[in-house]
Image (cartoon, rainbow, N blue to C red):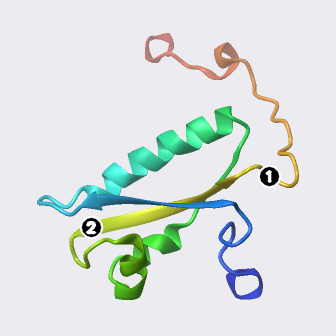
């Protein structure tokens, strides 16, 4: 799909957002970025925006030309990204079961 259409979201979404975190010891920056992107995804969904993770961005963390565009020094940061915008086609509604119908309390066994 990527070969035929390019990276999904990039080039069609109005915003490509790159999130960066300073590398450290222990190396937990990707987890930190994941939490950040999750919160962005939740907010985008609440605002009825389309959100697409562009995990290929993390592989660009050593690409000096890409990092120069971002004004980020090579080797210092881990990165990841997402595409955000209003979707051209609305998302289908989801029928979710009632919480009480799908919840099992441990004491109930």
Query: What percent of the width, then of the height, locates residue 109?
Result: 49, 16
Q: Residue at x 47, y 49 (%)?
A: 37
Which residue is identified by label 1?
A: 87
Q: Residues within 10 Å of mark 1 (few under 14, many from 20)?
A: some
Specify the label residue 73 is tagged with.
none
97 over 44 or under it: above or below: above
In the displayed structure image, the side of residue 41 where residue 68 appears, left or right:
left
State the image coordinates of residue 59 (x, y, percent, origin top left): 42, 78
Q: What residue sits right under mark 2 in the picture?
A: 77
- SS for tag 2? strand
Q: Is residue 56 above or below residue 108?
A: below
Q: In the picture shown, does residue 7 fall above or below 86?
A: below
* Residue at 76% over, 81% down: 5
Which one is nearer the viewer's eye here, 37 or 106?
A: 37
- Taking the spot 34% from the left edge, 72% from the top edge, the residue there is 71
Instruction: Name the residue: 36% across, 80% down.
Output: 68
Against 62, residue 20 (above or below) is above
> Residue 11 placed where, x, y %?
69, 72
**Left/right of residue 76 with respect to residue 65 in the rendered view:** left
């Amino acid at each position: 799909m990527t070969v035929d259409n390019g990276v999904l979201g990039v080039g069609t979404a109005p915003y490509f957002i790159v999130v960066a975190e300073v590398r450290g010891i222990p190396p937990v920056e990707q987890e930190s970025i994941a939490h950040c992107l999750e919160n962005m995804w939740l907010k985008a969904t609440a605002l009825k925006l389309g959100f697409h993770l562009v995990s290929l961005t993390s592989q660009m963390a050593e690409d000096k030309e890409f990092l120069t565009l971002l004004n980020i020094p090579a080797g210092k940061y881990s990165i990841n990204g997402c595409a955000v915008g209003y979707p051209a086609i609305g998302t289908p509604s989801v029928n979710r079961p009632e919480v009480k119908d799908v919840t099992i309390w441990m004491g109930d066994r």
